[in-house]
Image (cartoon, helix red, strand yellow):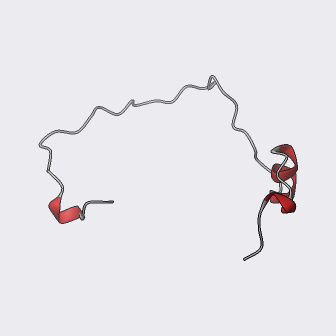
C-alpha cells in the first residue's frame, strides 16, 4: 500500500548528489536493442507456462 504524497513525512535536507558520473561504469548497460521475444527466449519463458483465462 502506498502513502499519499501529502501524508508523507517531510525532510529538511537533501542527500548530496555526485557532481560527475564515472566515465567507465562498472557494469555496461544491458538488454539494449533486444526485442521482447528475444528476452523471453533468453529467460526460457514459454506460452504453455501460463494458463489461459
Image height check: is 26 above or below 43? above
Q: Quadrant of the C terminus?
A: bottom right
Counting from the top left corner in percent of width and height, residue 35 is at 83, 56
- In the image, taking residue 17 as reference, residue 48 lies left or right, namely right
Residue at x-position 14% and y-position 50%: 10
Residue at x-position 35% and y-position 34%: 17
Residue at x-position 77% and y-position 67%: 51
Q: Nearer the viewer, residue 53 or 35?
A: 53
* Any part of residue 34 in sight: no
Q: Quadrant of the N terminus?
A: bottom left
- Residue farthest bottom in this picture: 53
* Any part of residue 52 in sight: yes
Q: Nearer the viewer, residue 12 or 24?
A: 12
Counting from the top left corner in percent of width and height, residue 12 is at 11, 43
Counting from the top left corner in percent of width and height, residue 37 is at 86, 58
What number of labels is visible?
A: 0
Counting from the top left corner in percent of width and height, residue 33 is at 81, 51
Image height check: is 25 above or below 29? above
Residue at x-position 60% and y-position 26%: 23
Amino acid at each position: 500500500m502506498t502513502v499519499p504524497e501529502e501524508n508523507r513525512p517531510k525532510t529538511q535536507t537533501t542527500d548530496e548528489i555526485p557532481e560527475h558520473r564515472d566515465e567507465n561504469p562498472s557494469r555496461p548497460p544491458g538488454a539494449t536493442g533486444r526485442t521482447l521475444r528475444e528476452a523471453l527466449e533468453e529467460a526460457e519463458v514459454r506460452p504453455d507456462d501460463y494458463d489461459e483465462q
